[in-house]
Amino acid sequence: MNIGEAAEAAGLPAKTIRYYEDIGLIRPPRDTNGYRAFRPGDIHKLAFLGRARALGFTIEECRALLGLYEDESRASEDVKRLAQSHLERIDAKIIELRALRATLGELVSACAGDHRPDCPILSDLASGPAGVPAKRGKARQQREN
């Protein structure tokens, strides 16, 4: 099977497959003409990687998961530990995103959105260093003024 067929079968772009090969996640054999010759096992690995990436696992985590998948003497606790660590990062990101949403929601609510130039959103963005949201009470103060 060539790369186009493999891409369709695995549900991944050919560019992603080439990248996975470049970084050593997969190693499809080559025909005498130099073209990749994907086997059913390669397609299965690609689909596995696609699903793992869709769940947000990093490339290195995918490498570890693939290694565990291929290791018949693996302990499921190793798989669970890796997945649990990823889940904890997702939970932390959700908390961070909720805080960002609350801050931005207050700023949007505080902005009149009219023809006047004053805007609490722009004021907040200009008030501090990047990546550090201003205090949430600031939007409320501007709305009250």
Image (spheres, rainbow, N blue to C red):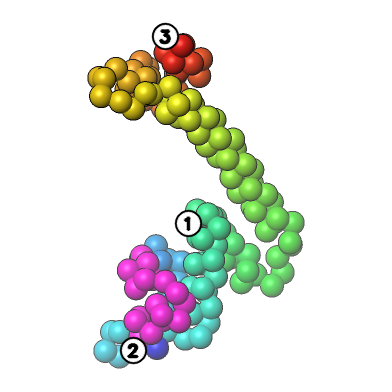
Q: Is residue 51 magenta?
A: no
Number of disc labels: 3
Element at badge 2? loop
Q: Which residue does the image show at 30% across and 25% down from the upper left?
A: 114
Residue 138 image position (x, y, % from top left): 46, 14
Q: Splitting the image into 4 quarters, where does residue 89 fall?
A: top right
The stretch of residues the image draws in magenta is: 2-19
Quickly name the residue at label 1.
Answer: 59
Residue placed at 47% from the left, 77% from the top?
Answer: 10
Distance from disc 3 to disc 2, alpha carbons, whole Å, reads: 73 Å
Measured in 3D between alpha carbons, the distance from the residue under mark 2 to the one under mark 1, in whole angstroms, is 27 Å
- x, y percent for residue 100: 49, 31
Name the residue beneath numbered marker 3: 145
Among the two numbered marks 3 and 1 on one chain, the one whose residue lies closer to the N terminus: 1
Estimate how packed mark 2 is, as few (under 14), some (14 to 19) or many (20 or more) residues with alpha carbons within 10 Å.
few
User: Which quadrant: the C terminus?
Assistant: top left
Nearer-the-camera pick, 142 or 98: 142
| Element class at badge 3 | loop
Q: In the depicted view, which residue is nearer to us: 137 or 27?
A: 137
Residue 29 in sight in this render = no
Q: Is residue 138 left or right of residue 52?
A: left
Mark 3 vs mark 1: in front: 3
Q: Quadrant of residue 117?
A: top left
Q: Which residue has dot 2 on it?
A: 31
Specify the quadrant that holds the N terminus: bottom left
The amino acid sitting under disc 2 is Asp
Q: Nearer the viewer, mark 3 or mark 2?
A: 3
- Of helix, strand and loop, which mostly describes the magenta segment? helix
- Spot occupied by residue 61 in the image (x, y as percentages of width and height): 54, 55
User: In the rendered structure, does residue 6 fall within the stretch colored magenta?
Assistant: yes
